[in-house]
């Protein structure tokens, strides 16, 4: 197998009338998805380009997925540009991307035409195109599995987004792991939460294609009305979810399951940020005991995930979850600052290698060279590995424990401190809903920013004093009604730090 579209073609042949992708307005079968994708692909083939980026500028819905696959049919690769993305960020992405075209729809055509791009296509026009099987066959014959499938843009430290380029081979290998590890089948119904420009959606989309499953797009607004969220999950018989912890925490903080429960849920996966154990315990203790819970961890640069941990024991509310062990066909290792391998309970940076590894950053050789480096443990032949920037350690069970990002580690009062340790302790405090720790470099202060109910600063500090040594104690507490979240649904640390340190 060399092309991810082979999964779609197989599904359309064997499961033509099965619902592949659905949202609140539309449900598309596999045969309909294939037909639409091939029409779009034939239309975009008029570009005459190969392995060039095409920006998909659409709302998040089932039809957007057919547009993504259509770009791939044209011999190019897609870059998802959500319609809610700020124009300034889109233009910064386009600075390095320089897309061959933008694919949009009538509702967003006017906005798309203001972007710095030569060609703009609409889905409506593309779907009127007759499928040219000869053109599509010629394009496929010229493709190989290391051709790019998509680029996903992540934040850059300089303010310029970086586009990680992932190939067909990456996603074929990754989806094989997800399907085999979690038993994903034709009966699986994913409830998709994350945006299509976020790497977690790759798991939902391509596990669905690989197994002939169904993916249901959950309206973003339903996470503000959790009763509607549960009703939606039950209506569509969603049995598998892969959400950011912040989304799971919304449900837990509202104690939603006292009023309504998802009836079909069998698997709860989470990634993207640290899962507060207290909120996870609410899910575990409130729902069917046979539901599988798993903590997945990894960067966009490893397709989505490089380590995972299936929850197999009880954890106290203030006990961090492991991120587990490496995925099949994706290896990890931990290096100390001196470049040697870390031992048990020794802190170091996590490195990734294997079939999930991205090619690098699109049109950004400098950042690529910084992050994708020669394996320090291999001097015999060229071997690319990825420096994750994650500080971790291996526990006595052989499980990797996440500590924090390297840039979350601070020096305070002469001590090296991981802000994540403070967050883990604070998340277990009475009434705590969400929290983050930030460091004010100018004032040399640790600031705990939180949202909570039926508690006080005095009570929080008292509980923290029983869990943390003196130098780890926050110097200042800032209460917010709700913590801001970014478009991926994760807590927006940068915005919070800017607000509380200005």
Image (cartoon, grey):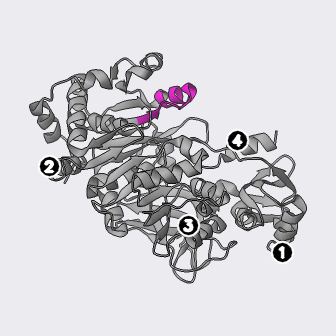
- Sequence-first disc among 3 and 2: 2
For label 3, the residue is 339
- For the point 49% across and 47% down, the residue is 194
Residue 38 x, y percent position in the rendering: 20, 34
For label 1, the residue is 466
Q: Residues within 10 Å of mark 2 (few under 14, many from 20)?
A: few
Residue 303 seen in render: no
Above or below, 51 against 122 in this view is: below
Residue 84 included in the magenta stretch of the image: yes
Towards the viewer: 330 or 176: 176
Q: Residues within 10 Å of mark 1 (few under 14, many from 20)?
A: few
Above or below, 144 against 36 in this view is: below
Q: Give the alpha-carbon distance from disc 3 to disc 2, as whole Å.
A: 51 Å
Above or below, 108 against 464 in this view is: above
Towards the viewer: 350 or 400: 400
Could you say which quadrant of the image residue 488 lies in? top right
Residue 117 seen in render: yes
In the rendered view, does 490 fall on the left or right side of 32? right
For the residues carrying marks 3 and 1, which lies nearer the camera in this image? 1
For label 2, the residue is 13
């Amino acid at each position: 197998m060399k092309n991810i579209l082979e999964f779609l073609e197989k599904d359309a042949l064997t499961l033509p009338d099965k619902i592949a992708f659905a949202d609140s307005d539309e449900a598309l079968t596999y045969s309909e998805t294939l037909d639409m994708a091939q029409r779009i692909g034939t239309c975009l083939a008029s570009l005459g380009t190969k392995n060039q980026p095409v920006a998909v500028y659409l709302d998040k819905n089932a039809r957007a997925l057919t547009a993504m696959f259509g770009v791939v049919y044209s011999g190019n690769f897609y870059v998802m540009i959500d319609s809610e993305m700020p124009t300034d960020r889109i233009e910064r992405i386009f600075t390095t991307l320089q897309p061959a075209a933008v694919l949009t729809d009538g509702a967003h055509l006017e906005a798309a035409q203001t972007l710095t791009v030569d060609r703009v296509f609409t889905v409506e026009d593309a779907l009127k195109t007759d499928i040219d099987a000869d053109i599509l066959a010629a394009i496929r014959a010229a493709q190989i599995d290391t051709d790019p499938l998509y680029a996903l843009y992540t934040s850059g430290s300089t303010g310029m987004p970086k586009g990680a380029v992932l190939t067909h081979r990456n996603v074929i290998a990754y989806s094989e792991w997800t399907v085999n590890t979690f038993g994903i089948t034709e009966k699986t119904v994913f409830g998709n939460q994350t945006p299509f420009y976020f790497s977690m959606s790759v798991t939902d989309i391509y596990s669905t294609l690989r197994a002939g499953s169904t993916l249901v797009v959950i309206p973003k607004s339903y996470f503000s009305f959790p009763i509607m969220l549960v009703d939606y999950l039950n209506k569509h018989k969603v049995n598998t979810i892969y959400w950011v912890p912040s989304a799971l925490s919304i449900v837990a903080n509202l104690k939603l399951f006292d009023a309504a429960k998802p009836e079909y849920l069998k698997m709860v996966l989470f990634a993207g940020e640290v899962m507060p154990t207290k909120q996870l315990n609410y899910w575990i203790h409130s729902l069917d005991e046979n539901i599988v819970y798993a903590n997945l961890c990894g960067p966009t640069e490893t397709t989505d995930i490089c380590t995972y941990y299936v929850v197999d024991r009880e954890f106290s509310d203030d006990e961090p979850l492991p991120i587990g062990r490496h995925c099949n066909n994706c290896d990890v290792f931990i290096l100390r600052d001196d470049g040697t391998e870390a031992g048990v309970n020794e802190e170091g940076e996590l490195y990734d290698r294997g079939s999930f590894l991205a090619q690098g950053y699109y049109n950004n050789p400098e950042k690529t060279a910084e992050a994708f480096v020669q394996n320090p443990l291999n001097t015999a032949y060229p071997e690319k590995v990825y420096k994750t920037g994650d500080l971790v350690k291996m526990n006595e069970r052989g499980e990797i424990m996440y500590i924090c990002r390297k840039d979350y580690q601070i020096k305070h009062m002469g001590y090296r401190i991981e802000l994540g340790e403070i967050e883990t302790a604070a998340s277990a405090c009475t009434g705590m809903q969400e929290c983050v720790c930030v460091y004010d470099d100018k004032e040399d202060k640790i600031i705990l920013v939180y949202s909570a109910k039926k508690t006080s600063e005095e009570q929080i500090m008292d509980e923290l004093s029983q869990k943390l040594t003196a130098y780890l104690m926050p110097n200042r507490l800032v209460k917010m009604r709700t913590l801001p979240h970014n478009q991926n649904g994760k807590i927006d640390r940068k915005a919070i730090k800017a607000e509380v340190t200005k």
